[in-house]
Amino acid sequence: MPIINRRILSDWLHVCHNGGARIGHTIKPDILFEPTDEVNLAMALQPYFEQVGSGPDLVLLHGWGVHGGIFESLYPALSQHFRITNIDLPGFGRSPMPNDDYTIEMMAQQLLKVIPEKAHYLGWSMGGLLATYLACHHPERVNKLITVGSNPHFLVRDDWPYAMQPKVMENFVTLLEEDYETTLIRFLVIQTLGSETQKQDVQKLKETVFVHGRPAKKALRGGLNVLKQVDLRQQVGELSHSILRIYGRLDSLVPVKAADKISALMPNSDQLIFRKASHAPFLSHQSKFCDAVISFLEQINE
């Protein structure tokens, strides 16, 4: 039986779900996939991930609408201290779209197939929500936890005003489905507010985030539903992990006023606010961000 190249099959599955080829990838028509090769097929259906560096395991989980390539600029600094596992969430980047309902539990189960047995976690935005979910439901798999621009509940409620309005979330996914590239570029511009090299940062990100094509529409809509429906506020107070929460003061998606509310839910966690950053301080303040991550993860717990 032939060996199935996981990346090629992953790209082929992406074409099936999205009706077109990925940007920057060519699918060879003479590649044959035998359904009897169950082992290789199962591997290809797992989330795509990259590993780089050496040391304690650190898993990176990206946010909604993009893929793991958003973190590539962090590799040089972090890979000197950790073995990084950078994962494309289901339906994003190079990861195939499962047939299951798109829920946070489905995402967690997909990740559990490929993540190290135990690792530190750094999750941005929706990735932070997912990392927190893993810490709550699979605490033995999580060492230390870092969330960036994240919220235990992303949707505004009467008792939770510092979050996103439902209409904003719906409008954003509609715009992404209609004009993915233009909308995402605008989103990236917002994320790099405060950076002294904003134009260069946005250009570099444009070259990175579009290289694997568009995410599956099911992943966009399903990820939006995850952000709307998941509420971990009652669970996060029970976490015993060492936790660092990072925010940008200029963030319009997770307002900085939410930080104090979340502190009340998680009194044993640490908090760091980048005063001149927006939703993605790892982009606009990369060096200081990496220093903070390394310092926190290498700190010996008393």
Image: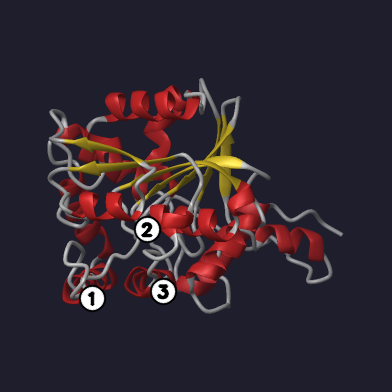
Q: Check disc 3 and give the amino acid type.
A: Gly
Q: Residue furthest top?
A: 80
Q: Which residue is mark 2?
A: 126
Q: Nearer the viewer, residue 209 or 286?
A: 286
In 3D space, how far apart are the residues under numbered discs 1 and 2 (Cα atoms)? 15 Å
Q: Position of residue 134 (x, y in %)?
A: 53, 56
Q: Amino acid at mark 2?
A: Met
Q: Quadrant of the N terminus?
A: bottom right
Q: From this viewpoint, which residue is outermost toward the right?
A: 1
**SS under mark 3:** helix
Between 195 and 2, the residue placed more toward the observer is 195
Marks 2 and 3, the one that precedes in the sequence? 2
Residue indicated by mark 3: 222
User: Which badge, 1 or 3, is on the more N-terminal residue?
Assistant: 1
| Residue occupying image coordinates x 48% and y 68% | 104
Residue 270 x %, y %: 34, 38
Secondary structure at numbered mark 1: helix
Q: Within the image, what quadrant is residue 199 found in?
A: top left
Q: CA distance from mark 2 to mark 3?
A: 12 Å
Kindly tell me whether residue 73 is visible in this rendering.
yes
Assess disc 1: are there few (<14), some (14-19) or many (≥20) residues with their C-alpha within 10 Å of its C-alpha.
Answer: some
> Which residue is pictured at 18% across the width and 75% down the height?
158
When the figure is inspected, residue 28 is found, relative to residue 175, above or below; the finding is above
The correct choice, above or below, for 226 with respect to 114 in the image is below
Q: Are the residues flagged by discs 2 and 3 in contact, CB closer than 8 Å?
A: no
The CA distance from mark 1 to mark 3 is 12 Å
Three-letter code, disc 1? Glu
Task: Give whichever of discs 1 and 2 has the lower sequence position.
Answer: 2
Q: Is residue 97 visible?
A: no
Which residue, given by chain and number where applicable, does mark 1 sit on? 170
Q: Is residue 239 above or below residue 85?
A: below
- At horizontal 44% and vertical 24% (from top left) the residue drawn is 76
